[in-house]
Amino acid sequence: MTQEATVRRGGLDERAVLLVAGLAELTASTVSSAVGTVRGLLRRSDAAELAAEAEHELLARGRLVLDRYAAVPPAHLEILARRALTRRAADDV
């Protein structure tokens, strides 16, 4: 019997348990990899410079996110008024 057939017979409860177990294993391996990377970075002599660069990058990313989602679009009537002034100035020349 294949593994798929076994999962189908087990029902939704068994599928949920298998999904949670798979997710837990993926999380554990990701955390383990991240810890190894952090240990490697801490051993470097330029760790302070790397931390400063990471801070600057995070600040820049934060500014981009805020500019993208928190910026208030210009008022529609204000845009129309500016276009009208530009046209009048162009007609006067």
Image (cartoon, rainbow, N blue to C red):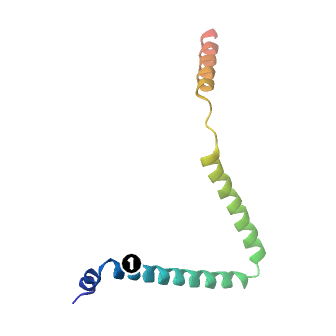
Residue 88 placement (x, y as % from top left): 62, 13
Where's residue 31, x and y in %? 58, 81
Q: Position of residue 20 (x, y in %)?
A: 44, 79
Q: Nearer the viewer, residue 60 or 66?
A: 66
State the residue in front, 39 or 7: 7
Residue closest to the far left = 1
> To which quarter of the image does residue 85 belong?
top right
Image position of 61 with respect to 51: above or below: above
Q: Residues within 10 Å of mark 1 (few under 14, many from 20)?
A: few
Q: Is residue 52 left or right of residue 70?
A: right
Q: Quadrant of the N terminus?
A: bottom left
Residue drawn at point x = 76 percent, y = 68 percent: 52
Q: What amino acid is at disc 1?
A: Ala
**Residue at horizontal 44%, vertical 83%?**
21
* Residue behind mark 1: 16
The structure residue drawn at horizontal position 58% and vertical position 85%, both measured from the top left corner, is 32
Q: Secondary structure at mark 1?
A: helix
Task: In the displayed orientation, state which residue is furthest to the bottom.
Answer: 1
The quadrant of the picture occupied by the C terminus is top right
Q: Residue 59 placed where, x, y %?
A: 71, 59
Q: Is residue 40 above or below residue 58?
A: below
